[in-house]
């Protein structure tokens, strides 16, 4: 049965990045101590959405044919940018519960998400009317007693709050038509307390049937080893629950359990046609035992690839860089790059210090360290997610810093991830529910707005830059900036796929100057020079002789719309602007 008052999912704070940058050596910059996000002080909403969404959203019904308003004309246009069909993608993390309500009950669902797919990607390579992401990561979608659904009741079903399996299949088909790959959260570390496996295991223990295969699925003991072990209904037996008592830990050494998960992976990859998995809490399969965790991750990766060779797997190893880079030894495609994420990560720190030069050093060294372990690895950079506070809070809603952070993330090699609402400058901090607030499509009571998680606090989230409808009307909005940055990333594939090197001859501390090289399918070397101005002031840089004859092919503007200019051999940078250069044709 569903619990009537489920506890929120909470994570133990983990070390993630390091103390202040030891700015020329990656190892010292990325291996010491930081904490999960608690730094932001939340502010009340500056739009009508935050104050009234919960009261009115449940009356909203989203017409599947309802269209979003088109943006006004931008002063910059780009040629059509058809993404390459590989595993290097721009992913958009979606919490279905808070995304778009398709039936008027206040809870997001697949009908709502499908109706809003054109916002993420409309399938037209020439269009500038979508975000341009070509990957979606769905947070857990399986039946669960909690709103976040990280405690699964049935691994082969859709939570009824989100719709039916037919609704999910329709969403997958619509996403694929648009060239969007979809990965889903796969929680291997634990289940819900009321999962049939756990109920059967406890029942077997009570009967003394210790050979029952379900007993091997979980970690049981006849002693309470520490405060993460809880009494079962079977007298004298305890179960492990590292996250909380409602999430009994699975025993991934069980061959019977592994067979279950092989069937589950096949169900989603083959029968439901998903494109891969985001693997939750991979450092907690065996807490504190990295070699065993890596063995499990190797098994998961090999199993998924045997079922679907093109499946994409990304793991959450919430730890320091020196730890999680070792998890690439498993063969997994990607691991989230926590060292550059969150309020204490290298991206936010470097922006606040206005130190682009040392950010470039760390960026280059990080890629080198990862590729030395796994030459085929695909980094997974991100800025924030459903467990951290939101980026706008880390950067005090500073328009210039938010834009620069977006560019830094999207111009990092790998598959970049954007958390829903990040492109709008949403804020959310404190309890987890505040970080998972409704996406503000428009005024409350319209256009598919959800009510959000049940324990979300009215003053715990806000929309300082307005709704989607408002930002679509403004070519200088943060949303418009994200659209342009993703278009540039797609237009020049070497940005996501290139080997990163420091660009010589750039002298200013504020400049992150990196050159990328990538060999395309026709064995042609594609090169690009990226220069990000981390300064809040305008500055200039003589183009180094190594790049004589290179052209300024694109730029990303300052908050007031000023763009980089090239005057003979000099680059002129407005505050927090970005230049993209290529060799002359």
Image (spheres, rainbow, N blue to C red):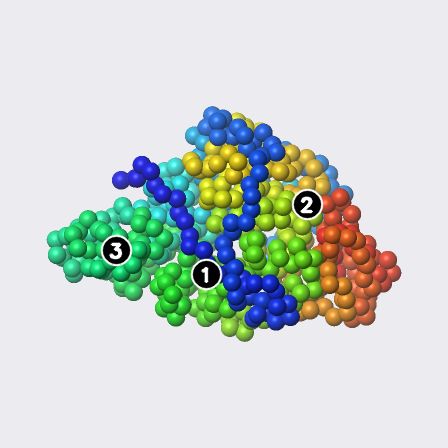
Q: Which residue is mark 2?
A: 399
Q: Which residue is mark 3?
A: 239
- Looking at the picture, tell me which residue is in the foreground, 427 or 211: 427
User: Which residue is situated farthest in the bottom direction here?
Assistant: 372
Image-based side of 269 in relation to 551, left or right: left
Image-based side of 318 in relation to 358, left or right: left
Q: Mark 2 and 3 residues: CB-CB less than 8 Å, in contact?
A: no
Q: Is residue 63 visible?
A: no
Give residue 83's position: percent from left, percent from top. Answer: 60, 54
Name the residue: 38% across, 65% down.
288
Name the residue: 46% across, 41% down.
433
Identify whether 413 is placed above or below 103. Answer: below
- For label 2, the SS is helix
Q: Quadrant of the C terminus?
A: bottom right
Name the residue: 83% across, 64% down.
542
Badge 2 or badge 3: first in the primary sequence: 3
Mark 1–mark 3 distance (CA, rounded to whole Å): 24 Å
User: Which residue is situated farthest in the left direction here?
Assistant: 207
Badge 2: residue crowd in 10 Å (few <14, some 14–19, many ≥20): some
Image-based side of 63 in relation to 12, left or right: right
Badge 2 or badge 1: first in the primary sequence: 1
Using the image, tell me which numbered label, if any, was put on residue 317. Answer: 1
Residue 75 lies in what quarter of the image? Answer: top right
Give residue 160's position: percent from left, percent from top. Answer: 36, 38
Give residue 56's position: percent from left, percent from top. Answer: 49, 26
Mark 2–mark 3 distance (CA, rounded to whole Å): 48 Å
């Amino acid at each position: 049965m569903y619990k009537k008052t489920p506890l929120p999912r909470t994570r133990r704070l983990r070390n993630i990045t390091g103390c202040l940058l030891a700015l020329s050596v990656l190892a010292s910059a990325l291996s010491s101590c930081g904490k999960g996000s608690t730094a932001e002080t939340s502010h009340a909403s500056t739009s009508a959405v935050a104050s009234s969404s919960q009261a009115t959203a449940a009356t909203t019904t989203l017409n599947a044919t309802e269209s979003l308003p088109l943006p006004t004309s931008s002063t910059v246009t780009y040629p059509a940018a058809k993404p390459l069909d590989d595993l290097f993608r721009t992913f958009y993390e979606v919490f279905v519960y808070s995304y778009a309500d398709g039936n008027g009950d206040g809870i997001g669902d697949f009908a709502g998400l499908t109706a809003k797919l054109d916002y993420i990607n409309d399938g037209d390579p020439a269009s500038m009317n979508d975000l341009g992401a070509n990957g979606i990561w769905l947070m857990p979608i399986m039946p669960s007693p909690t709103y976040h659904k990280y405690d699964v009741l049935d691994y082969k079903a859709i939570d009824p709050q989100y719709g039916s399996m037919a609704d999910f299949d329709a969403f997958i088909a619509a996403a694929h038509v648009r060239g969007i790959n979809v990965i889903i959260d796969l929680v291997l570390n634990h289940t819900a307390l009321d999962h049939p496996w756990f109920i059967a295991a406890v029942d077997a223990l009570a009967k003394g049937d210790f050979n029952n295969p379900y007993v091997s699925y979980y970690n049981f003991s006849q002693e309470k080893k520490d405060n993460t072990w809880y009494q079962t209904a079977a007298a004298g037996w305890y179960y492990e629950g590292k996250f909380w008592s409602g999430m009994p830990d699975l025993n991934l050494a069980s061959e019977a359990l592994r067979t279950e998960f092989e069937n589950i992976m096949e169900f989603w990859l083959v029968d439901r046609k998903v494109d891969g998995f985001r693997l939750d809490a991979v450092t907690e399969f065996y807490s504190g035992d990295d070699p065993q965790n890596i063995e499990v991750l190797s098994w998961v990766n090999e199993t998924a690839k045997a079922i679907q060779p093109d499946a994409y797997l990304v793991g959450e190893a919430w730890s320091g860089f020196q730890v999680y880079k070792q998890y690439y030894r498993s063969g997994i495609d990607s691991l989230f790059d926590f060292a550059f994420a969150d309020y204490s990560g290298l991206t936010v720190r470097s922006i606040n210090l206005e130190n682009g030069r040392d950010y470039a050093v760390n960026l280059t060294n990080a890629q080198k360290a990862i590729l030395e372990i796994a030459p085929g690895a695909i980094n997974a950079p991100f800025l924030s997610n459903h467990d951290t506070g939101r980026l706008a809070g880390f950067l005090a809603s500073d328009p210039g810093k938010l834009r620069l952070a977006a560019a830094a993330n999207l111009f990092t090699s790998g598959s970049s991830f954007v958390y829903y609402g990040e492109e709008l400058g949403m804020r959310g901090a404190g309890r987890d529910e505040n970080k998972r607030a409704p996406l503000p499509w428009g005024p409350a009571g319209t256009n598919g707005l959800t009510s959000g998680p049940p324990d979300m606090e009215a003053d715990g989230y806000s929309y300082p830059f307005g709704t989607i409808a408002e930002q679509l009307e403004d070519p200088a909005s943060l949303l418009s900036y994200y659209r342009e940055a993703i278009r540039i990333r797609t237009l020049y594939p070497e940005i996501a796929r290139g080997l990163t090197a420091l660009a010589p001859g750039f002298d200013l501390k504020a400049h992150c100057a990196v050159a990328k090289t990538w060999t395309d399918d026709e064995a042609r070397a594609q090169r690009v020079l990226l220069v990000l101005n981390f300064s809040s002031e305008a500055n200039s840089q003589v183009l180094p002789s190594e790049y004589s004859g290179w052209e300024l092919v694109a730029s990303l503007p300052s908050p007031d719309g000023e763009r980089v200019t090239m005057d003979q051999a000099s680059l002129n940078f407005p505050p927090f602007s970005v230049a993209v250069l290529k060799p002359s044709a």
